[in-house]
Image (spheres, rainbow, N blue to C red):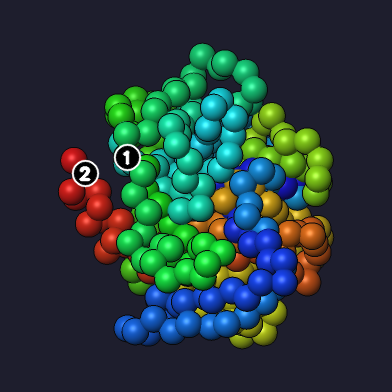
Amino acid sequence: MLLHISALLYFLTLSSKTLSIISFCSTAVPVAFICCFCFSGAMDSGIVGGKEAKPHSRPYMVSVQHNGRHTCGGILIRKDFVLTAAHCLKADLEVVLGAHNIKKTEPNQQRIQVRNSIRHPNYNKYTTAGNWENLTVDIMLLKLKSNAKLNKFVKVMKLPGKKDKTSVKCNIAGWGMRQPNSMESNVLIETSLTVLPQPECKEIWQIYYDSNCMMCTATAEDNTFCQGDSGGPLICKSKLQGLAIYTFRERCNDPRYPGVSLKISTFLDWIKKVMGKEI
């Protein structure tokens, strides 16, 4: 099931171009890597495999939309703030809260326009002429024009602690394609994932992976997140742990290529600083 998330993904299409990737979370001084790989700019697909979620069982889920169309997933972390991926930025964004079927106008839905989009300050700071985004800081906060009305259909997801340990068993959800290159799902889809050991993630993704601020997930089946729905939440033991950012475009349902999420705990200081200013 292609998670249209909230994630979860992030790909870069490299057509015989060289990509300079800078890591901001492993050292005090940014370190640049020169490399080539086949990712794709990802916003229009989602979770591969999985099953339909129980309606409104994930009241923190957000559909980030542009011109009435779902583009990414998101997480309601305060009644006036949504957390998502930085590459999901578009003009005139709005969010839909309390939804199960995003193609219907459900009575519990709340549609709120975004007042301000705040990308991580290091995002796009160091890029090539091709304007390739930095994977290690692919995170963004959306300040809403009005507060969400919290109820049993719309709830805030608590941020993780800095020292919270990530469980091996996690899950993810979103609105997106059920198979690569298929139609998007109207209803929320969910799937279970296993967090892989960091050395294994590093061996697979190599210079694209920084274990200080990333984690990767896979399953024995073909369930995972795929193109699009970046910004979706990785939930472990009912706690928010990760923000889905990228996987391998052409084989997103191939268990040899695990999906990658940012560790939200790495960005807590920045998140709290931004929300403190935007009261």
**Residue pictured at 59% horizontal, 74% vertical:** 19
Quadrant of the rendering where the C terminus is positioned: top left
Secondary structure type for disc 2? loop
**According to the image, label 1 marks what residue?**
116
Quarter of the rendering containing residue 143: top left
- Amino acid marked by disc 2: Glu
The answer to whether one can see residue 248 in this image is yes
Place of residue 51 in the rendered image (x, y in percent of width and height, measured from the top left): 74, 41
Secondary structure type for disc 1? strand
Place of residue 108 in the rendered image (x, y in percent of width and height, measured from the top left): 49, 19
**Residue pictured at 37% horizontal, 54% vertical:** 119
Marks 1 & 2, CB-CB < 8 Å contact: yes
**Residue pictured at 81% horizontal, 40% vertical:** 182
Of labels 1 and 2, earlier in sequence is 1
Relative side of 243 to 53, left or right = left
- Tell me the distance, in whole angstroms, between the alpha carbons under discs 1 and 2: 9 Å
Place of residue 21 in the rendered image (x, y in percent of width and height, measured from the top left): 52, 75
- Amino acid marked by disc 1: Asn
Relative side of 106 to 140, left or right = right
**According to the image, label 2 marks what residue?**
278
Q: Nearer the viewer, residue 109 or 128?
A: 128
**Residue pictured at 40% horizontal, 75% vertical:** 24
